Amino acid sequence: MLPPICISLPPAISVHASSSRTATSSSPSASAPRPRWPRTSPNPNGKIHRLFDDGRVPTDNPFYNTPGAYKSIWSYGHRNPQGLALDPRTGELWETEHGPRGGDELNIIQPGRNYGWPVITYGMNYNGKPLTDQTQMEGMEQPIHYWLPSIATAGIDFYEGDAFPKWKYDLLATGMSAQELQRITIVNNKVTHIETILKNQGRVRDVASGPDGLIYVALNTRSPDHGELYRIVPVSEPKWTTLFNGQNLDGWRIRDGDSTVLVDDGMIVAVSQDPVRESYLVTEKTYGDFILELDMKVIGKMSSGIMIRGIDDPIKPDGIITGYQMEVDQSPRQWTGGIYEERARKWLYSLEGKTEARKAYKPSQWNHYRIEAIGDHFRIWVNGIPTLNMVDSKTAEGVIGIQIHPARKPGASSILYLRNIRIIDHNAGDHINGIAIPELVIDSPK
């Protein structure tokens, strides 16, 4: 026979059916009277219940013999329980629950105890008015930890694997509104350290320590109806490969145009001289998933671009490289870090209205770029500032290159300088950075 299990019910539940999905709502409105459901209440809500998996009620439950009480009650005084997990070392039951506006709680659940809602809380009402002036009261349990502001806690689990040995038995706690996964170190039932290990990837709903020792995270991404399952794996130090040896253009070739490209003082120097055609400096090798970093400086009025998975068709006599191009924009428009699709759909992701991203680029100075192309996800940082978070599935592989614009007007030539060009193209997805700007879907796999 399996041991008893605990389930939790929030103070009030209303179910709204909508075609193929249901949603539950548990929080009273700002003006509604606060519900009070003591252990003897005929209402099962606001309590944690302990049952056998076949529905029988254990006879050693604390209120099994209490007249008027649900025999299944294990604890009470809960606002909106979300996560339950047993500490594998002690067998203690830990719980997270939503506070109102602020005051999400982490509790150790003990049989028969009152956890205080709505008499005591560290949160306030949604209209900004206090629910109560009491945060402590005799006979009511204090949380082990509370969050101000709320993170909208959800599922929790203790990490029991070996893949992350320094995290052994730490508590993993999810946050929906905060869009984060926290790692919580607990010593002698006290929180000693909290670290955010996943951020801004979507509303984090649940987490589990898998039998393979890895960590699995369920998220809402893009929209409430779109979910993804992430797997967190340990990674070694990234293995960068240098794409430019600082001495010559081995591994590169020049396509189209008559602009000059040479190596000087450990840098690639490209001078736009062709009055009509673009010139391209591209890799001889093609790349699928990769992380690219480089430093680039543009002197002059002409803009430039970094080709990402560019299509280099040797049959085409003009040698034009088509495909994704990260714009390097010298104009007052300042769209550096956006994506333009050369000879195709044109602007896929501009920086119009993105004030912080537009400030990242420094005209006529050295700028550092990080470009992540993993599957159909593209992310770009300019000088450490995120400028692009895009999903598009059109091109899965291609060359990396630099576009050199033509000098169509007298005196309009520009000079490009490049250095510190390096790439991760093996298990690149293991080394992506979190990004704090919304994802824009251009075209995703059907």
Image: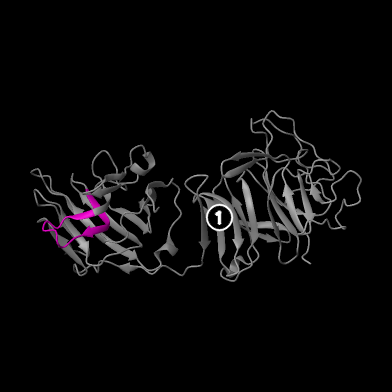
Left/right placement of residue 325 relative to residue 100 reads: left
Give neighbour class at mark 1: few <14, some 14-19, many 20+ (Cα, 10 Å): some
In this view of the protein, can residue 425 be seen by the observer?
yes
Magenta stretch, residue numbers: 304-322
The residue pinned by badge 1 equals 218
Q: Position of residue 384 (x, y in %)?
A: 38, 52
Amino acid type of the residue that numbered disc 1 sits on in the rendered structure: Ala
Q: Residue at x 18, y 46 (%)?
A: 302
Against 345, residue 316 (above or below) is below
Q: Position of residue 111 (x, y in %)?
A: 82, 54
Against 7, residue 356 (above or below) is above
Q: Residue at x 82, y 51 (%)?
A: 72
* Residue situated in front as seen by the camera: 304 or 400: 400
Q: Position of residue 98 (x, y in %)?
A: 67, 44
* Residue situated in front as seen by the camera: 263 or 390: 390
Badge 1 element? strand
Determine if the magenta segment contains residue 306.
yes
* Residue situated in front as seen by the camera: 427 or 236: 427
Quadrant containing the N terminus in the rendered view: bottom right
